[in-house]
Every structure is written in C-alpha cells, then in structure tokens.
Image: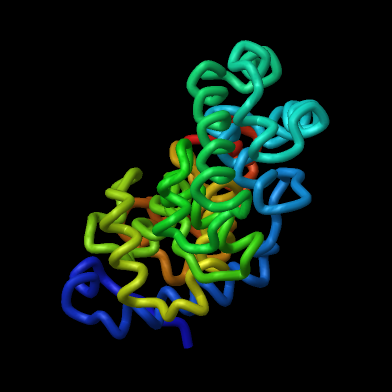
Amino acid sequence: MQAQHSPSNNETNPSLLTDIAVQAHEILREEYDEYATMLEYRNAWELLVAVSLSAQTTDAQVNKVTSVLFARWPGPGDLADAPIGNIEEVVHSTGFYRNKAKNIKAAGAVIRDTFNNTVPDSIEELVKVPGIGRKSAGVILHHVFGKPAIIVDTHFGRVCSRIGILSCDPAEKKPDPIRTEKEIAEILPPERWSSFSMVANLHGRRYCTSRKPDCFNCPLREICSYRYLYVEPVQPGAASTQSAEAASTPSSVPEDGT
C-alpha cells in the first residue's frame, strides 16, 4: 500500500517522509536510468571540465566543445598552461565563456599543483576546485567514484518539494538547496542518495516540470502532495484529454534551469 499524506506530515511524522521518499525512489528507478548522462568523458578530469562547462547550455554542445578542448589540452597541466584567449575561443559556444575559460584553466592548475594531477574523491576537496560547487561535485562522486552524494539542482528540489518530503510548501518551485540537501540526508540512507538524486532530476525534466507538470500521467501521482493540494480534480475520462493537451504544449517540455 502506498503512503498518502497531508502537508502537516512534513513536520510531525519523519518516518512517513522516509516511507514516501523510498516509495518515490523505487517507482522512479523503474522509469529512469540512474547512471544516465549525456556528457561524454573518459576519466574524472574530463567529467570535471564537462560539468563546469555545462551551466546554461546543452550537453550536446558541451560534448562538441570538449572533443576539441581535450584534443588540444588533454590533461590538467596542459589546460593550466594554455593561453586564456585560446581557451575562450574553444569554449565560446557554451556561453559565459570568459568565466568558464577562467574556471577550467584555474581548475587545471589546482588539480595539478594541489592534488598531484588526480581529481579528488571527496566533496570537501572537490568544492575547492574553481568552478565546482556541491552539485557538480556530487555528479563526479556518483558517476566516477560510485560514492553517495545528494545532487541538488532546481529539478531535484522541485520534485522533492512537490511530493511533500521537504519542510517547505509543496508549491515551492525552488526550495533552498542547502536545506534540501540536509533534509533529504535526514530521511534517506546514504546508499540511496545518488540514485534518488539522478532519477528525481530526470523526473523533474520529463513530468514534474516547472510550468506545466504532467500530474495526470506522473508515476508519482498517488503519493504527491502537490497533486492533492493544487491540481484540480479531474472527472473520470478527462485525464487523457488534459494529458494530451499538456504533452502538446511547448512550455510543458522540460528545459534546463526550470
């Protein structure tokens, strides 16, 4: 039997939050590949650079850039010693190219000089690398080192908020990332962190979008606070019509940063 809950459960029944989070995780594992990533990389260093370049652009565009970038400067030291203008020219198409070029050049120097040309495998050390925050560090830990990490971005936070496992209102689209990480860590065991992060992120892009969530086709609809509180009840036979309309509306397509 699936647990159902009201908003008050956020504060009064932590064990129910765990039950709901685990149920959501198991359902989403059936829908998505927790190891899916469209970024192309051969080692930890290449993924570090790729995630640093991925902000406000597409994975496909990052892959085009990194294929050229690593052909010219394959290692951290190579990139650290490269002229900044040359790096800017290569990464220009990813947007915010000056900051990105500065960050990956500085990251190369830090990996070479501080970490002996080895990408560290702890979040505490990864966030010392220029351009790498907790989200990017978590991606590296999960995909390269197989270590637990809660990877918080807008998609993940929105899904967690809507299914009612955070202390904020389920309608909150952008819950505080630090608070989100802390609260998820309190209700899920570490062995579920990375997997849940990845599948919830993918769910936020496919069904639980910011502007027009497809609540009627959502596999989490039976345990979702947002659906019960904020989505109008649909009469029998109407769900398929509304879902079809939502699917055909351009704004319902998941977008980066929504």
Note whether residue 258 is visible: no
Q: Quick one: 191 or 221, which is closer to the camera?
A: 191
User: In the displayed structure, would residue 86 be above or below residue 152?
Assistant: above
Q: Quick one: 159 or 4, which is closer to the camera?
A: 159
Q: Which residue appears at 62% of the width and 66% of the height?
A: 145
Q: Position of residue 211 (x, y in %)?
A: 45, 37
Q: Residue furthest bottom?
A: 1
Q: Position of residue 202 (x, y in %)?
A: 59, 53
Q: Which residue appears at 67% of the width and 14% of the height?
A: 86
User: In the displayed structure, would residue 47 be above or below residue 121?
Assistant: above
User: In the displayed structure, would residue 59 be above or below residue 164?
Assistant: above
Count of marks, rendered view: 0
Q: Would you say 180 lies left or right of 100 here?
A: left
Q: Position of residue 97 (x, y in %)?
A: 56, 18
Q: Would you say 139 lies left or right of 4 here?
A: right
Q: Which residue appears at 35% of the width and 68% of the height?
A: 184
Q: Position of residue 221 (x, y in %)?
A: 49, 64
* Residue 14 position by quadrant: bottom left
Q: Which residue appears at 34% of the width and 61% of the height?
A: 181
* Residue 217 position by quadrant: bottom right
Q: Would you say 172 lies left or right of 189 here?
A: left
Q: Quick one: 243 or 127, which is closer to the camera?
A: 127
Note whether residue 132 is visible: yes
